[in-house]
Image (cartoon, grey):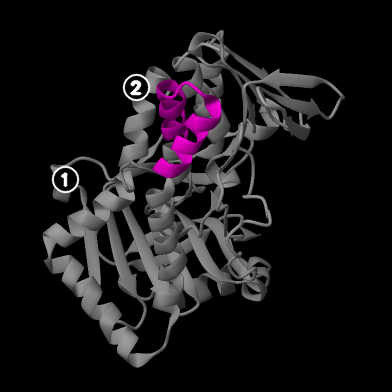
Amino acid sequence: MSGAARRAIVIGGGPIGLLCASLLAARGISCVVLDGRSLDEARRDARLLALSRGTWELLAPLLGAELPPRAAIREVHVSSAGDFGATRIAASDFDGADLGATVLYGDLLAALAAHVAGQPAIEVRRPATAAQVRQRADAVDVLLGDGTVLTAELAVHAEGQAAADADDAPAASSDDWALLADVRLRPLRAAVPAGAAFERFTRSGPLALLPTPRSLGAGTGPVFSLVWCMRGAEAQRRSALTDGPLLAELQVELGSRIGEVTAIGPRRAMPLAQRRRRQLNHHRVVALGNAAQTLHPVAGQGFNLGARDCFTLADALAGVAAVPDALACYARRRTADRATIGALTGSLPALFASRFAPLAVARGLGLALLDTAAPLRRQLAQLLMFGVRS
């Protein structure tokens, strides 16, 4: 079957599923996108996504004027509670170019949905669920919840958390949770530079403050999106606190290096299931994004890894004639990036949570070394912005 006649079924109509369909259509592969939510329901998702510079550079030519509102990330301050070292990764390390940006999930989804709506090669079905995927030698059949059967050359799983298949890597602790909210900060310095982000490692888990396109009522001082990682019982307890006691506990963990948190908005606690699918492809079925791996949110790498999955899959299908061979090529090309980023995000929380004194000294020395050794700092930033290039 020629590239122009190929057809894919993308299961999942979130940003990763729509991005995948857009890239496949641009390479002559028509797509049917299935999503269990209506577009209005999906657009109400209030999550904040951290996009690396590499991901933004991949999206910009695709979306053009449809790019969503963003808050630029210009510098990242990294510190560890109780340790002497700290470091700052800044745009000045890269000739002034932004390190990345944050966007609201709903805004990015709306931008990708508008782009997809103008592509004749893409059909989106909402709400529609895939009840079963059946493989044949030369095709896949996807049985929908309403009994309809769709047939295509391949099926792409691009929805939700990585499945707990028998060949999956073991899941990380199921007791990892995060408390999410928007907060207002009174900086320690006269002003926090526009685009500043903070990654604060504590003994109970990482705590991140990210610039956000959202506002937070009346008041002065910059607004940040808080991602505060902790054990499940603590997340549930803290999510039920009133503002005053919660702000007091947050301030203790944040310390005095950054400033005073003066206000907090609505919050929610969510579990952080971490899983990585060992086998991405099986004949004519392939997984990407959160269906392939779900990561700890430290360093904000989840969406970026999924975006690179999409681009690699599209390139592999465009360059290899037989679909099973193309999917195997995709899986091979994603091995190093997935393993490296997964190991990094999986190990950092435990590394910085340890109270072992020699390790604490090593952490401080490591952060101090990063702050003084510009080449090493740039290498780390390059990894976080662009991943391991295949």
**Residue at horizontal 30%, vertical 43%?**
389
Say left or right for 388 vs 112.
left
- Secondary element under disc 2, as helix, strand or loop, is helix
Picture coordinates of residue 10, whole percent (x, y): 62, 28
Say left or right for 328 vs 195.
right
Question: Type of residue at label 1?
Answer: Phe
Picture coordinates of residue 198, whole percent (x, y): 35, 60
- Secondary element under disc 1, as helix, strand or loop, is helix
Q: Quadrant of residue 213?
A: top left
Q: Which residues are magenta?
A: 310-333
**Residue at horizontal 40%, vertical 27%?**
315
Report the quarter where the C terminus lies.
Answer: top left
**For mark 2, does the 10 Å Cα neighbourhood hold few (<14), some (14 to 19), or many (20 or more) residues?**
few
Q: Which residue is mark 1?
A: 94
Picture coordinates of residue 45, whole percent (x, y): 62, 40
Residue 117, placed above or below residue 137:
above
Q: What secondary structure is the magenta-colored segment mainly?
A: helix
Asked whether residue 244 is drawn in magenta, I would say no
Residue at the extreme front of the image, as rendered: 137
Report the quarter where the N terminus lies.
Answer: top right
**For mark 1, does the 10 Å Cα neighbourhood hold few (<14), some (14 to 19), or many (20 or more) residues?**
few
In space, the residues marked 2 and 1 are separated at their CA atoms by 21 Å
